[in-house]
Structure formats: C-alpha cells, structure tokens
Image (cartoon, grey):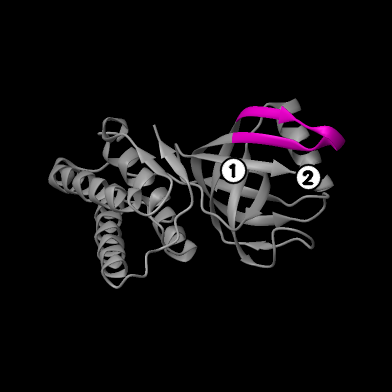
Amino acid sequence: MMNLPLFPLNTVLFPGMPITLHIFEERYKAMMQWCLDKRQPFGVVLIGAGQEVGEPATPRTVGCTAEIANVQRLSGGRLNLVAIGEQRFEIVELDFSEAYLRGMVTPLGLSLPTAVSQPTTRGLRRQLLAYLELLSTLGEVEFNSAKLPNDALELSYLAATLLQMPNDKKQDLLGINEGDDLLAQVYDACREETAVLKAMIAAGEPKQVGPFSLN
C-alpha cells in the first residue's frame, strides 16, 4: 500500500498509454513538483462527482499510476507534461490534508491471457484495424498497422484508449482483473463501436473525431 497524489480527470488512463496534461492550477503545480522532486508517480482517476477545476472532485476507486516522461516549463509556473500509465490501483482511503488530493492505494494485479485467448487477440487486432480505417475517413486520424502491438494486454489497453466510447465503459474495462475477460470485453466493445460508426456513416451523421496519431 502506498500514499499517492491523485489527479481526478474526465478521462481514463490505461497501463502503457500516454497522457498529455497542461498544469495551471496551483495545487497541481505543487503536486507535479513533488512528483518531480521525489521521482514518484501520481495517480490518474476518473471523476465520479465534481469538476476538474475548482473544488476537489470525488474520484472513482480504480485508477492508474502515471510516470512523468517529459516536462515543458512555461511562464507562471505552468507545465505541459507527458506521462505514461503504469500500474492499476484501488483507492483504500482518501486524504484531503494537502492542497491536492492524495490517497492510500493498493496495487491491482492482472492475470495474463491464456493460450485460448490467442484467436480473440487476432480478432481484436483485425477489428481495431477496421475501426481505425473508418475513423481515418472522418477526421485527422493517422495510424500505422505495423505499430499495433501483438501482446494481448497491450493491444487491449490500446484499443480501450482509442475507442470513442463513454468514460464509464472505459472505467469498467480498467477495473477488470482477469486478462481473458479484459480481452473478450474489449473485443466486444470494439465490434459494437465499429457497428455504431458504420451506422452513423450510412445515415450521413458521422461521428466527430479528434486528431490523434498511431505512428
């Protein structure tokens, strides 16, 4: 168990995935400086109630640690940073004694997918490629199929990150502790989102897609 600085956000971070943040609030400037000085991660947690800016938000109980990989210092102490998701955790107790939220957390393990899951892994890869090809027709989306990982867990978390679905659904995926279950549910989600995207395109109501690159 460890005491971890927590950053409640309107996003879900998965292990191995990057997150970019612009830090401008004083409490989060202090948090990031503590992390940099101590060479410690912070925890990204989805907001359950409240807002990102202003009064402290109440987070969901499962989050992911984030290791700062790159920092750009700006005027007024503001920061642009890139962090990489590492370890899932569960909040045991919240600590409001600091200017920013902290929590006692316990790491969450994840069982590896079994050999039986290999066909599902190949199916997810094909499904994700089809989904990305559809997205590429709608917005500034770039991807290189050679960049898709072969590892089942890496592929699952990448797909969960890229799918344009509600955060509540992504949070449910983050909370899964069984590799086989994670792979199967991400595969189902990818199929569902691909079908939704096809239907919207056919109806002439394409989904708005933000720019991202998988190169």
Label 1 sits on residue: 1
- Nearer-N-terminus badge (1/2): 1
Q: Residue at x 41, y 58 (%)?
A: 164
Q: Is residue 73 magenta?
A: yes
The tag on residue 52 is none
Q: Residue at x 44, y 55 (%)?
A: 209
Range shown magenta = 69-82
Along the horizontal axis of the image, is 11 left or right of 71?
left
Front residue of 49 and 127: 127
Crowdedness near tag 2: few (<14), some (14–19) or many (≥20) residues, C-alpha within 10 Å: some
Along the horizontal axis of the image, is 150 left or right of 26?
left
Q: Looking at the magenta stretch, what is its main secondary structure?
A: strand
Front residue of 166 and 214: 214
Q: Residue at x 31, y 34 (%)?
A: 144
Label 2 sits on residue: 24
Q: Amino acid at mark 2?
A: Phe
Gap in angstroms between the C-alphas marked 1 and 2: 29 Å
Quarter of image, res 37: top right
- In terms of secondary structure, where does tag 1 sit? loop
Front residue of 207 and 11: 207
Q: Residue at x 27, y 60 (%)?
A: 194
Quadrant location, the N terminus: top right
Along the horizontal axis of the image, is 138 left or right of 69?
left
Q: Position of residue 210 (x, y in %)?
A: 48, 52
Crowdedness near tag 1: few (<14), some (14–19) or many (≥20) residues, C-alpha within 10 Å: few
